[in-house]
Image (cartoon, grey):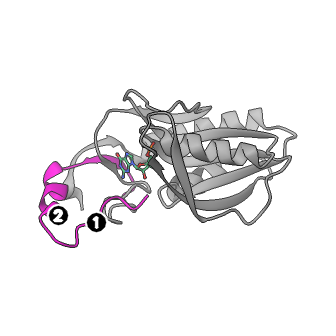
Amino acid sequence: MRQDIESILYDAECIHDRVLQVGTRITRDYQDKDLLLVGVLKGSFVFLADLARSIDLPVEVDFMVVSSYGSGTESSGVLTIAKDLSVPVEGRHVLIVEDIVDSGLTLSLLAEDLRSRGAASVQVAVLLEKDVPRSHQVECAYSAFHCPDAFLVGYGLDYAERYRNLPYIGILKPEVYEDRAQCPDARQSGR
Ligand code: 5GP
């Protein structure tokens, strides 16, 4: 797989150190609070596994599968929930764990949805925040890395369901997706 990667942005050791720092902050901020970690599948599964183990609190973990699309205007969109939480969030402190925030549409809609269910608080922990002008405002209370505007894979992030198991985060060579775009069954990133 390494031959498909243009460059490694964050190696395993660097990711480990940053995730530990984020986990330490979360531990400090959520003392005496009933914390529910909500992982957004599939991209967050590696980050969530490491982050949860770096939080020294009795957290609960649940998962959602969501997708979003714009509704024609810049400020709104529609959230589709393919897999919902298995527990109610009313009165609970929710921390959404996401792989990467790009436009911010998915996260802003998801946070709004969980707030409307009566969560005591809803915050976001994100592995990567792309340095791009954000069309949808989303407050990331915890952010491991600010990254350049490139297509990244590894540590949970995929291209066409591949590369999630890379232990590092790297920039995918453009020719990989340009080649696949010629194939009739080419698929996009699977969240
Ligand atoms: P947003 O709603 O913020 O525009 O989109 C966020 C989602 O887009 C992420 O959860 C992820 O599934 C996908 N995405 C955005 N940028 C990248 C990227 O560089 N690499 C991969 N693999 N997925 C991305």
> Residue 180 has which mark?
2
Residue 11 location (% of width, % of height): 37, 45
Give percent across and percent down for residue 95.
68, 44
Seen from this angle, which residue lies furthest bottom? 185
Q: Residue at x 83, y 37 (%)?
A: 31
Q: Quarter-wise, where is residue 135 in the image?
A: top left
Pick the quarter of the image with the N terminus: bottom left
| Direction from residue 92 to residue 27 in the image, left or right | left
The amino acid type found where label 2 is placed reads: Arg
Left or right? Give the position of 32 relative to 159.
Answer: right
Relative to 53, 107 lies left or right: left
**Residue beneath label 1, please?**
187
Q: Tag 1: residue type?
A: Arg
Q: Which residue shows up at 16% across the image and 61% down it?
A: 181
- Whether the magenta-drawn stretch holds residue 8 is answered as no
Is 78 in front, or is 91?
78
Q: Which quadrant does the C terminus fall into? A: bottom left
Tell me the SS state at disc 2.
helix
Upstream in sequence: badge 1 or badge 2: 2
Residue at image location 55% in from the left, 43% down from the top: 107
| Residue 78 visible in rendering | yes
- Circle on res. 7: none
Task: Specify the segment rendered in magenta.
Answer: 166-191
